Amino acid sequence: MMSQERKMITTSERGINTDSLPYRLYRKAKKFGIWNPEDIDFSQDKIDWETKLNDAQKDGLLRLMSQFQAGEEAVTLDLLPLINVVAKEGRLEEEMYLTTFLFEEAKHTEFFRLALNALGVTEDLSHYHTGTYKYVFYELLPETMNRLHHDSSPKAVAEAAIVYNMFVEGILAETGYYSFYRSLGDLGLMPGLIEGIKHLQRDESRHIGFGTYLLQRIISENPDLYDHIMKKMMEMAMLANNVVSENIEAALERNDELETDPEETKRFAETQFKARISAISRAKGKHVDEIYKLKEEEIGVID
């Protein structure tokens, strides 16, 4: 039996939909996502590490960096199943953007390792991974993403976007950036690390934006999934609270001076969750063509 003849999009009358949000994200990634972790100068960071941070502050920074390092590695490893689903569905513009997405996650993984190397940190840091953190990154994330290998239904894709984009990137990572800025940026310490974090946050704003778009598209095409998506988001809110609370408890136990206001950290995480819920809910009742025409600023993309 002959297989169905493949149809090429770019040589058809359709061509590339350059007005679609995924393509516009692709263009932004080409423009803003080309920073090189190897170009960042960590020389002042090493001086700050050795002369301006006490043991408690170093411990707090290693906790934060170790969780980012492992988290970036995890999202780099776990993105491919989503790319495969999008490719099989023939969503060319989405796949084009996701190729930049994976490239950026690899750079984020490299960035944190280079920063740790520059500080002379070579020991095992996995003891900083709390119970809920391990559940999220060692079990939930890979299981949810790998499920797409055998289940590419809209429901499965939606759950992947919720865990990966809304929860891991949209709540946990954003709260982590906030902690970096508040603990180091405001004090003028570790300029190389802060420079890289700014690059990461801009990259991740596109990733979160894509996840928001993807969930909005799924809701517009499958309105019956709206309640399930919102229920899943609430489950992630509880997990986010657990991760943040465990980190705060660990910081307080070790007299971590970088955690200056635990309640403010919790409030920030809650604000991020509410922003994700609000963005997703705006898809209700919209036609998919309206979703394709979303503006970048509507989904929080940073230039």
Image: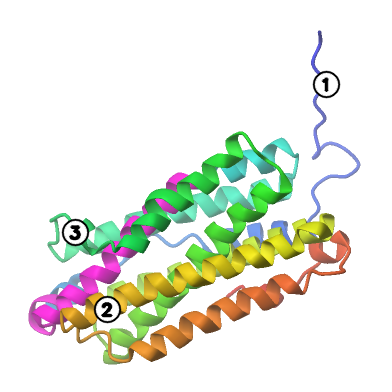
Residue 198 vs 293, above or below: the answer is below
Relative to residue 238, is residue 72 drawn left or right? left
Return the residue nearer the eye: 66 or 204.
Answer: 66
Crowdedness near tag 3: few (<14), some (14–19) or many (≥20) residues, C-alpha within 10 Å: few
- N-terminal of the two: label 2 or label 3? 3
Task: Name the residue: 40% across, 51% down.
Answer: 74
What residue is rendered at 32% in x and 73% in y?
Answer: 246
Q: Position of residue 25 (x, y in %)?
A: 65, 62
Examine the rendered structure and indicate whether residue 98 appears above or below residue 175: above
Name which residue type carries label 3.
Asn
Q: CA distance from mark 1 to mark 3?
A: 51 Å
Would you say the residues marked 1 and 3 are in contact, meaning their CB atoms lie under 8 Å apart?
no
Residue carrying label 2:
249
* Residue found at x 59% / y 35%: 149
Tag 2 and tag 1, C-beta contact below 8 Å: no
Can I make out residue 111 in this image?
no
Provide the residue designation for mark 3. 117
Q: Is residue 279 above or below residue 95?
A: below
Residue 272 appears left or right of 137: right
Q: Nearer the viewer, mark 2 or mark 1?
A: 2
Most distant residue in the right direction = 13
Binning the other alpha carbons within 10 Å of mark 2 as few (below 14), some (14 to 19) or many (20 upward) gives: few
Residue linked to disc 1: 5
Q: Say which quadrant the C terminus sits in.
A: bottom right
Highlighted magenta segment, given as a residue range: 49-78
Where is residue 128 drawn, in percent x and y? 23, 64
Earlier residue among tags 2 and 1: 1
